[in-house]
Amino acid sequence: VADCIFSPPEDPFAYGDIGVLLGKAIRDTFPAASILRGRETIRATVVGAGTYTTTISGSTIDYVAELLPMKNLPVLKLTAGEERRCYEGESSPLAEKIAWFRAQSEAERLVLALEGLADPSYSQLKSAAAAIADAWEASMPPDAPVLVLVERDMAKALGFALRGRTARPVLAVDGIRAGQDDYVDFGRPLMDGMVIPAVVKTLLFG
């Protein structure tokens, strides 16, 4: 709603609720000089509650420091079947899902969330990296970095494999669980670059 006060979309029902109308009503009711524009907004036009979980990734991470910090990155969570197809080297299903997700969210950047494997083989890592890199090339803007969250301890190896498949900047972080429709913030590296603070934000709607 805060964004709709200052830069509303043309369609008053663009979000399927009264958020745009409410923003216009606030703008029309109060003098412009009395409304202070916030530096950050939560970008939700319905009443919800945000839950925040701060996690520090372990040392088995791979990233380009120039990418950080980043905020409000939407999460695309793969199902077990979709993830398995990545390890088999299939990029088309992932590219299609990314294209669908971007059409729904208008996201220019996103974070791919995987459960990961307990003991991945070299061939599985290469296949997954190839599938992710090819899907990114097919479905993401040219300047979008490859951002991956993995629950299991395999991000560094996956990050190295991704660097061998794409010229895009890569960030691969493990030890973090995020679900579909969550948002993630990444802070600046800590402890001489060995860890990255991450905040997973979930909007709960009633």
Image (cartoon, helix red, strand yellow):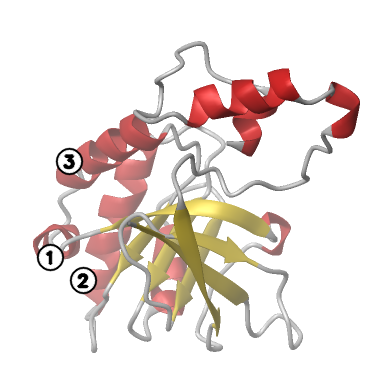
Residue 5 left/right relative to 76: right
Q: Split into 4 quadrants, where in the image is the C terminus?
A: bottom left
> Please, what is the three-letter code of the amino acid marked with disc 3?
Ser
Element at badge 2?
helix
How would you rate the neighbour count of disc 2 (Cα within 10 Å): few for under 14, some for 14-19, many for 20 or more?
some
- Placement of 80 over or under 4, stated as above or below: below
Label 1 sits on residue: 84
Label 2 sits on residue: 124
- Placement of 82 over or under 23, stated as above or below: below
Numbered circle sitting on residue 150: none
Residue 98 seen from this side: yes
Residue 65 left/right relative to 95: right
- Placement of 53 over or under 3, stated as above or below: below
Q: Residue at x 32, y 34 (%)?
A: 104
Numbered circle sitting on residue 92: 3
State the separation of the CA atoms marked 1 and 3: 13 Å
Earlier residue among tags 2 and 3: 3
Q: Residue at x 51, y 11 (%)?
A: 10
Report which quarter residue 79 is drawn in.
Answer: bottom left
How would you rate the neighbour count of disc 1 (Cα within 10 Å): few for under 14, some for 14-19, many for 20 or more?
some
- Placement of 165 over or under 175, stated as above or below: above
Element at badge 1?
helix
Q: Residue at x 21, y 71 (%)?
A: 123
